[in-house]
Image (tube, rainbow, N blue to C red):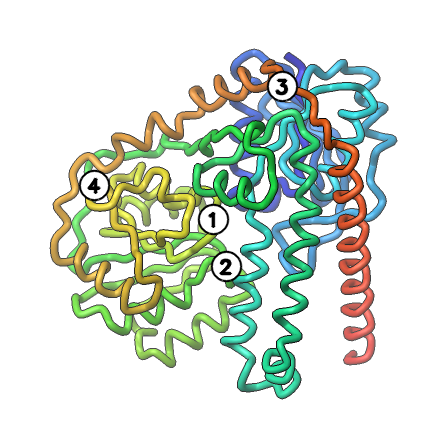
Amino acid sequence: MDVAIFSDTFMPCTNGVVNTVWSISKGLKKAGNSVHVFALSDKDSDEVIEGVIVHKFQGRIFRYYEDYRMRYMIPIRRIFKIAKKVNFDVIHSNSHLSMGFCALLLSRLKKIPLITTFHTLIPQYLEMYTDYLKATYYEKSRILRFAYKSKFIGFINKITNKLIWWWLSYYNICTWITTPSTFSKKILINNGIYKEKILVVPNPIDISTYKKAKEKNEIPLILHAGRLSPEKRVDILIKALKHVKSDFECIITSEGSNRELLQELAIKEGVSKKVKFTGMVSKKKLTEYYHKANLFVSPAIYDTFNNCVAEALSHNTPVIVDKKSGATDFVKHGINGLIVKSSNPKGYASQIDLLLKKNDFKNISNGIKDYTDINNIVAKFERIYTKKNKKNKKVFFDIIKYLFSGAFFYFLLALGEVGVVLHNAIHK
């Protein structure tokens, strides 16, 4: 099978989407398929990496989230030139943005089945950022206080949320939609994405570095891995540590827009001596942390899967997650971890204490290995790629909603770019 995979984020960026896209690309190649990846990256190039043909298109760094890139002028001419030489059997899109639009255009004009994977609950992330903005700057900004008190922010959020779901009509246009958890599937269905098109396929996790025997620590180690941005809610973890009665050390890895604020928060909460911020670490070092940790805590909500939680489980490390997380598909309360229902610092603190005092979980990694095995997941995608589906009778209206809202948001993004340039020029 000749497979074309499209993504707006790719190496050298590192995030869950990149890891998933790359693992599936390599897995499909290993299974005997010809795989072409079309992705926004740091440069224009054509490369062969581990047998996968990678077509990179230089994109602008998305200023609000540097792990993603954007491109206003889509490289459709170069993509169609490649598609003339390769008769693709299927297109697999991992975004509804720049490269997602290219995938859709190629699919419609060449009449190639389009499969798409839904990775990110963007409307819920917007809600998280709004809550974070209020919690962080409400007392500092008179304009922000007025905006909230006058209900202007609520009004804007309501309209924006509607338009984002219009933008996500992209998924209704596709042949099949995959998403990594039943948690995210339910949210999609509740917001107008066609139930009959959605299939759940977990993200693959590399367990090649797995070690059976756990190290023992004199002082229990709490680990958090993942991007330091508002939607990961690392601030909840830091506030929770203040209420933990047991002795502990805590390691927080990775980088993000919130790192400095989180470090300041650790000082404010009086736990800075027990918390270590490592910044970005190598895969080898992260594996060592997974292996040493007594427990892994992720307060993130609205993750469609949460690769880091699955990785922790694969290293026999029990986890604590929120009830509003895609990880609840594979985290079983009282079996391989705990699910927090009271989503606040004290709720997390009580669960952390519970695990630190008594952790008698055994064979934690058993279920996660087969569930996230790359060979099983590649086989699922190969079946989906050849699976027939009925035509969408409402496709015209979905295309109109997608194009209208997409043009609106790209206009806002362009406006934001201009604003940043002017701000930098004025304050030089």
Check residue 335 in the rendering and tell me which mark sits there, or answer none. Answer: 4
The location of residue 338, given as percent across then percent down, is: 25, 50
**Mark 1 neighbour density, 10 Å: few (under 14) some (14–19) many (20 or more):** many
Element under label 3? loop
What residue sits right under mark 2 in the picture? 231
385 vs 292, nearest the viewer: 385
Q: In 3D space, how far apart are the residues under numbered discs 3 and 2 (Cα atoms)?
A: 35 Å
Q: Nearer the viewer, residue 209 or 367?
A: 367
Near mark 4 (Cα within 10 A), the count class, few <14, some 14-19 or many ≥20, is few
Crowdedness of circle 2 by 10 Å Cα count: few (<14), some, many (20+)?
Answer: many
Which quarter of the picture shows residue 88?
A: top right
- The residue to which callout 3 is attached is 389
User: How far across and how far down the image is residue 295, in percent?
Assistant: 26, 52
Q: Which mark is residue 303?
A: 1
Q: Nearer the viewer, mark 3 or mark 2?
A: 3
Which secondary structure, mark 1? loop
| Lower position in the chain sequence, tag 4 or tag 2 | 2
Instruction: Indicate whether 414 appears above or below 304.
Output: below
Specify the amino acid type for callout 4: Ile
Label 4 SS: loop
Q: Calculate the distance from the C-alpha at mark 3 to the C-alpha at mark 1.
A: 28 Å
Residue occupying the point 44% across, 20% down: 375
Q: Callout 1, which amino acid?
A: Asp
Residue 97 in which image quadrant? top right
